[in-house]
Amino acid sequence: MVRAFAPGKCILFGEHAVVYGHPAVAIAIEQGVNVSIEKFEEWVINGKKFERSRHPHISHILYDLFEYKGAPLKIKIESGLFPAAGLGSSAALSNAMGAALHKLIKPQEKLDLVKLAKIGHSAEAAAQEGRASPTDTATSALGGCIVVSEKKVNGTKHVFDAELMTPEGKRNWIISKAKLPEKVEDLWLILGFTGESSSTGKMVSDVANLLTHEPDKVDLMNNIKEITYKGLKSLALGDFGAVGIAMNECHEQLRDLGVSSNSLDRLVEATKPYSLGAKMTGAGGGGCMVALSRNPQRVSEQIEIAGGTPMVSKLVSEGVRLV
Ligand code: PMV
């Protein structure tokens, strides 16, 4: 049997603004998706018959990317992520599946993280009508803190370039790693799930409508861009107080953009007194918020009191790996 794990992610800065060409900063979290596969007498996934149409990510990886023609497989998927909550569970699934299949087919060959990130991105695009940013898959594959942008961002280390032919034309991204200080053991990311799932597509289209009807709101995008650069600089310096302030500011801009929700605002406000900073993360309209804190127990309690479900992750987590 072969087994691989790929982490989920949360966006620290730049959600929505990244759709308009500005950078986004995402960070891998401790929790993610485990995939195990073994040869078997029939095709089975989590104890049920494997049907291609019900598992688009897995089918694309098996048949289009690996051109798998071997024996039937028994596939087991175990996720430690809240579903449809902006934590990149489908990207983690794609990366873990890609890594496990690679190990099964080419056991002597070392895992190539960039190749896996590209496989994962291709699987996301195939499952989402050709529209997918490489943010989730790159962060889950490479681990650490990842910057996705159209232009090179100073102070980051270039890792690879991604491109995708979308229904709207060709899109290109630069994927880089942001530097994080080595000593971060006493810092935690605390995710708070509102219990409400949300559609990224709908939130992105709501923002597009808002900008059409109220063009002045484009200022909010520019503000998010400035906050993202400030946040990145503070991260590299290890000035986590400033990182937290940038997170609070980012939340305010996203709220003014109309993508927060009452429950997200409630969780953010409840955690702020015990955090360096807190904000919604991802597309919004539900899903999760994230707080940066040295007191994960207290922040988790606050999330529960405010009606959410907490999950604690260390600040620096590795990317996809065989387990
Ligand atoms: O909630 P998520 O992880 O799917 O984040 C979406 C981030 C957006 O910027 C809103 C959309 C995108 O494609 O980058």
Image (cartoon, rainbow, N blue to C red):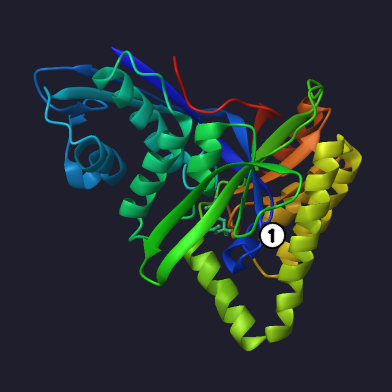
Relative height, residue 279 to residue 300 (above, below): below
Give residue 209's quadrant in the image.
Answer: bottom right
> Viewed as shown, does residue 18 lie left or right of 296?
left
On whether ligand 1 comes within 8 Å of the CB at mark 1, the answer is no
Residue 132 at x, y percent in the picture: 44, 56
Does the rendering let one see residue 294? Answer: yes
Q: Quadrant of the C terminus?
A: top left
Q: Residue at x 60, y 34 (%)?
A: 28
Residue occupying image coordinates x 35% and y 31% = 98
Q: Residues within 10 Å of mark 1 (few under 14, many from 20)?
A: few
Residue 63, given in percent of the width and then of the height, sits at: 19, 39
Q: Quadrant of residue 156?
A: top right
Q: Is residue 88 visible?
A: no
Identity, as a three-letter code, of the amino acid under mark 1: Asn
Where is the N terminus found, in terms of image quarters? top left
Q: Is residue 51 toward the left or the right of residue 128 in the image?
A: left
Q: Position of residue 260 (x, y in %)?
A: 67, 61
- Vertical placement of 72 versus 261: above or below? above
Which residue is more in the foreground, 86 or 104? Answer: 104
Relative placement, left or right, of 78 versus 216 is: left
Q: Residue furthest bottom?
A: 213
Instruction: Please state the horizontal and vertical placement of residue 101, each as a whole percent of the image.
Output: 29, 25
- Relative vertical location of residue 27 with respect to residue 39 in this rendering, above or below: below
* Residue at image mark 1: 262
Name the residue nearer the viewer: 109 or 116. Answer: 109
Foreground pick, 139 / 55: 139
User: Quadrant for ligand 1?
Assistant: bottom right
Q: How many marks?
A: 1
Q: Residue at x 81, y 40 (%)?
A: 235
Give the quadrant of residue 188: top right
Under circle 1, the secondary element is helix
